[in-house]
Image: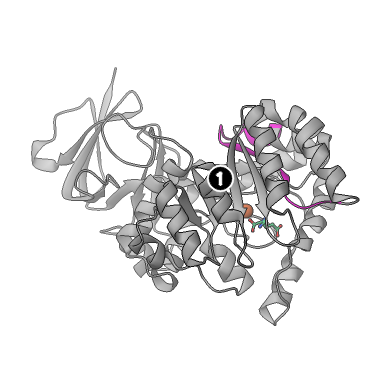
Amino acid sequence: MSSTVITHIGELFTSDPEGPMTVEDAAIVIEGGKVAWAGSSTDAPAADEQVDVGGRAVIPGFVDSHSHLVFAGDRSAEFAARMTGTPYAAGGIRTTVAATRAATDEQLTSHVARLVDEMRRQGTTTVEIKSGYGLTVRDEARSLAVARQFTEETTFLGAHVVPEGDPAAYVDLVTGPMLEAAKEHARWIDVFCERGAFDEDQARAVLAAGDAAGLRGRLHANQLTYGPGVRLAAELGLVAVDHCTYLADEDVAALRDSGTIATLLPGVEFSTKQPYPDARRLIDAGVRVALASDCNPGSCFTSSLPLCIALAVREMGMTPTEAVHAATYVGAQALDRDDVGALTVGRRADLVVLDAPSHVHLAYRPGVPLVAATWLGGRPTT
Ligand code: NIG
Ligand code: FE
C-alpha cells in the first residue's frame, strides 16, 4: 500500500479533544486513505510520496451535520424583504415545496451536485442532507434517493411543515406510507418542532414511527421561540438537536444531563436577523456544541462553514479553537461518526489545507477564501 507524507504543516489542527489540539511544524502520513501517523515534523517517518504545504495550516475537513440541499427555486426576494424588516416565517417553505415538486430528478440532482461541490471548495468533506421540500410520498422518496447519491447521511424530514390539508391526516401520512417509502433511502428522521410546524405530540409520534422503522431521530427545535423541542430531544436521548436559539435554563440543564449535542446554525440568524444562539452559555454549562450550515433556500442560503465559524466567534462567544472543533469533531459526533472529524490515527484522511498559518484565521479573516485544497480519503479534490 503506498503512503503519502504531508510535510511543512505550519500548524496541524488535529481537533482531537484528547491529544494536543494543535501541533506546530507538523507532518501527517496517510496510508490507505486514512491517517497513519500525525505529529511533529522532526519525528515524521518516511513515505513513498511527499507533499510540501509550505508552512500552511492543515485542519480536518468540515463535517456539516445539517443541510437541506434537495430543492428547486429561489427565495432571494424573501431574504431582501427580511433585510428591511419583514420577519422570517416558516410558511415560506411551501414556496420551495411547489418548485421542488415541479422539478425533474435530473434538475434536483444537478443542483445538489453544484452545492456539494461548492461546499467541498469551502472545506466540507462530510455532509448530512435532508429531504423536506417534497412532502408527498413520491417527492420525499425521490428527494432522499437524490441525496443518497451524495452522502450516506440522509435524513427524512417529511415533518417539515404541513403542506396542505388537515394536520392530523398529514402526520398519519408521514408516519405511514411516506415513512415506508423513505426509509430505504434514509439513516435519520427529523421533525421541525416549532409553532407553525409540528407540536410536541406530533413530533413524538413521528420520531416513534421512525424509530420503529430503524431510523434515528434528530430535531429542529427552539429556533423561532421557546418550546418543548429541546427537552423532548433530551428526554429521548437523541444524539443532536438543532437550532437551540431560544433556551430556558431547564433546556440547558436537560441537554447537559442527556449529553445531547446542541447544533447551532448561525447562518440562520445572519439571514433572518434573529438573535444568535448563546454558545458560551451552553459550553460553560457542559453541553457539547456543534456548528453546521443549515444550507437551505429559505432561512439560510450559505454553504460556508468558514462563515459559520466566523459568526460563532464574533457573535456567539466561542473561541476560534472551539468553533473549528465544533465544525469538525463535534459535527462528526452529531452524526454519530468516529471515522471523520479529526486528524488522528485511523480516521479518514479528509483534510483542508488553509492558505493561512493557523486555524484562527478562519475567524480572523472572514469572507476570505482560505481553503487552498480539500483532501478526501487521502487525495486532493480541489
Ligand atoms: O432549518 N427550520 C426549518 N427548516 C429550515 C428552513 C426552511 C425554509 O425556510 O425553507 C431551517 O431553518
Ligand atoms: Fe434546517
User: Which residue is drawn at the image coordinates 55% and 63% (left, top)?
Assistant: 267
User: Which residue is drawn at the image coordinates 60% and 49% (left, top)?
Assistant: 219
| Magenta residues (range) | 145-163
Q: Position of residue 187 (x, y in %)?
A: 59, 32
Residue lying at the far left in this picture: please name it.
42
Q: Determine whether 270 is above or below 116 in the image.
A: below
Q: Position of residue 376 (x, y in %)?
A: 42, 36
Q: Residues within 10 Å of mark 1 (few under 14, many from 20)?
A: some
- Ligand 2 closer than 8 Å to the CB at disc 1? no
Give yes or no for residue 52 being in the magenta stretch: no
Residue lying at the far bottom in this picture: please name it.
84
The residue identified by callout 1 is: 117
Residue lying at the far top in this picture: please name it.
1
User: Which residue is drawn at the image coordinates 33% and 23% (left, top)?
Assistant: 32
Using the image as rendered, state which of residue 120 and residue 210 is in the foreground.
210
- The picture quadrant where one finds residue 51 is top left
Q: Secondary structure at mark 1?
A: helix
Residue 214 left/right relative to 379 = right
Q: Amino acid at mark 1?
A: Asp
- The picture quadrant where one finds residue 210 is top right
Using the image as rendered, state which of residue 186 and residue 24 is in the foreground.
186
Using the image as rendered, state which of residue 120 and residue 185 is in the foreground.
185
Q: Position of residue 337 (x, y in %)?
A: 43, 35
Residue 349 left/right relative to 169 = left
Asked whether residue 294 is in view, the answer is no
User: Which residue is drawn at the image coordinates 70% and 40% (left, top)?
Assistant: 206
- Where is the C terminus found, in terms of image quarters? top left
- Where is the N terminus found, in terms of image quarters? top left
Residue 204 left/right relative to 39 = right
Give yes or no for residue 161 being in the magenta stretch: yes
Mark count: 1
